Amino acid sequence: MLSPIDITRYSFPDFVRFIFDRRVADAPWWHSDWMACAPGVVGGLSHTVGDAARLLEYLIQLFETADRLPDEYTRCQIEQGFWFISVMDGLDPPLWDRDVPLALRQQCIEAMELLFAKLFAWESLETASLIWWYNFAKGYDLDEGQPTDEDDAAIQQTMFETIRRVLWIDSTACRQSALAGLIALKHPETAATIDEFLEENPDVDDALGAEFVSLRERALAWS
């Protein structure tokens, strides 16, 4: 059993170093060095954090200053770090934690637009940026886009509005990620959004445009 570490007790600079200042290997560092956040660990992997609100505040600050990361870390370290954030249950649970103010959770989602505008649009990563929105929206995919209650609906709507803004960033990486997010989110306004996007961007890459047209046809079924 690995010992848990509460990264929300770190200062913000130490928090950033903890995530990105890591060796890069075929097996990500967290598979062997550290498997999760405190306080609870099940089978070596925790699904909680020490202070969910502080974690979200740190992530907002990280997204707002994401353009500074390439000055300190390699492309591979950045790729690995954002995979850690999106798949290791560090960010995902606090977004649905009802003990954390909804406004803070929505602010964190909205700050992801800055992550794309300041970093992902310019720093070509292998997969972390592409799969970013899908990793957070996949729960809606499993529920056919139907939120469970008003809080869940508010998070879905905030994701949709933020993904929609990312879609309009003039970057293939941003648009591909937004596409993956829209597929998972299954928001009822998806088809209308794609119509508007394609009308305003008639010169979009043919292959990507075909993906949007395909998604529009699928979206009509859940709108």
Image (spheres, grey):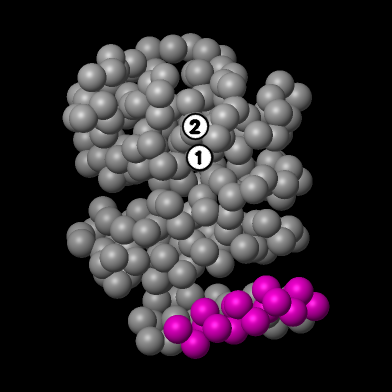
State the residue in front, 114 or 46.
46
Q: CA distance from mark 2 to mark 1?
A: 9 Å
Residue at point 55% right, 83% down?
Answer: 214
Q: Amino acid at mark 1?
A: Trp
Residue at point 38% right, 37% down?
Answer: 88
Q: Which residue is mark 1?
A: 83
State the residue in front, 217 or 59.
217
In the displayed structure, 39 sits above or below 181; it is above
Classified by dominant secondary structure, the portion drawn in magenta counts as helix
Rendered image quadrant of residue 99 = top left
Q: Are marks 2 and 1 in contact (CB under 8 Å)?
A: yes
Q: Earlier in the sequence, mark 2 or mark 1?
A: 2
Q: Amino acid at mark 2?
A: Pro
Query: For the residue carrying disc 2, how many other residues have a C-alpha within 10 Å: few (<14), some (14-19), or many (20+)?
Result: some
Q: Which residue is mark 2?
A: 28
Q: At which x and y percent is residue 119?
A: 69, 41
Q: Is residue 13 left or right of residue 36?
A: right
Query: For the residue carrying disc 1, how many other residues have a C-alpha within 10 Å: few (<14), some (14-19), or many (20+)?
Result: some
Q: Secondary structure at mark 1?
A: helix
Asked whether residue 82 is drawn in magenta, I would say: no
Which stretch did the figure color magenta?
Answer: 203-218
Which part of the image, by quadrant, shows the N terminus? top left
In the displayed structure, 93 sits above or below 155; it is above
State the residue in front, 218 or 164.
218
Rendered image quadrant of residue 137 = bottom left
Q: At which x and y percent is residue 52?
A: 32, 29
